[in-house]
Amino acid sequence: MGVWPTNCPELVADLLTALNLSASTIVSVKELHDMPIEEALLNHYEIARITPDILDFINERSGDAVLADLLKPERAPDLKHWLWGRQLIDLLETFPVKVTAQEWINALRKIQPRLYSISSSPKVHINEVHLTFSNLRYSTNGKHRGGVCSTFLADRAEKGSVDFCPEIGALPPACWQGYAHDYGRTRHGGGPLPRFPARASCTG
């Protein structure tokens, strides 16, 4: 079962502060519509994981010699050690950049559902799906960090509905045909993966 998380509001605020961008700045989100950058970062983009593409982007925009040296092929072990436990906000705070809101959005990847195994039986829990997950929290360099989806489920999911993206076999048979069409189309680059809203109830 795929769960669509939203990002931590505090992390979004920290990113906007690091970038010196206003939360109300309007950006264009591909396949959706124009919206404030705060909303885009909360709901539609990956803002925790440091990817090779974002490393190259920060390197180009920061012009920092230390980062440029870390990205040399012969420094790969040192780069891996430096990245351990760090998130995108740590990269930005260490190597500041000046970008427009739209440039930043264009540099990010769209958020993707996180996959979890179903731990319940439809014979016992009718119209319910139970997931078991580990709540990832840790500290790095004296700063608290956490997993995108596990902290979403633990801290914020009960405040509203949770969008999910099930495997075809996890849906009732009546839903398979339409969902299979959407899933097959989007998996081949035709658009975003579909979302199904559901109410959440989390227990520790």
Image (cartoon, helix red, strand yellow):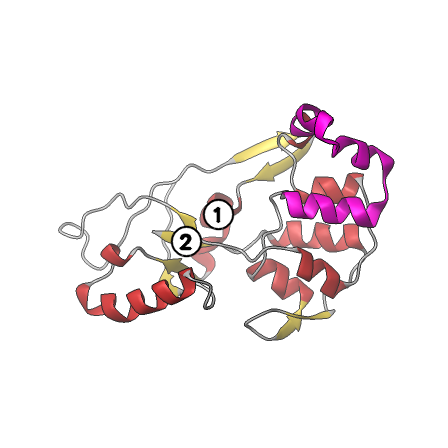
Q: Which residue type carries mark 1?
A: Cys
Q: Compared with residue 67, is residue 201 higher up or lower down, i.e. above or below?
A: below
Residue at numbered disc 1 = 149
Q: Residues within 10 Å of mark 2 (few under 14, many from 20)?
A: many
Q: CA distance from mark 1 to mark 2?
A: 8 Å
Residue at numbered disc 2 = 3
Let me know if residue 183 is in the magenta part.
no
Q: Please report the residue visible at 22 percent of the width from the left and 60 percent of the height from the top.
A: 127
In this view, the residue farthest toward the front is 73
Image side of residue 162 versus residue 170, left or right: right
Q: Quadrant of residue 184?
A: bottom left
Q: Please report the residue visible at 57 percent of the width from the left and 53 percent of the height from the top.
A: 7
Let me know if residue 53 is in the magenta part.
yes
Image position, residue 119 (x, y; %): 26, 43
The secondary structure type at the circle numbered 1 is helix
Query: How many marks are shown on the rendered structure?
Result: 2
Q: Please report the residue visible at 18 percent of the width from the left and 57 percent of the height from the top.
A: 126
Q: Please report the residue visible at 37 percent of the width from the left and 56 percent of the height from the top.
A: 200
Image side of residue 78 versus residue 134, left or right: right
Report the magenta residues as a range: 52-80
The reply to whether callout 1 and callout 2 are in contact (CB within 8 Å) is yes
Image position, residue 83 (x, y; %): 66, 32
The secondary structure type at the circle numbered 2 is strand
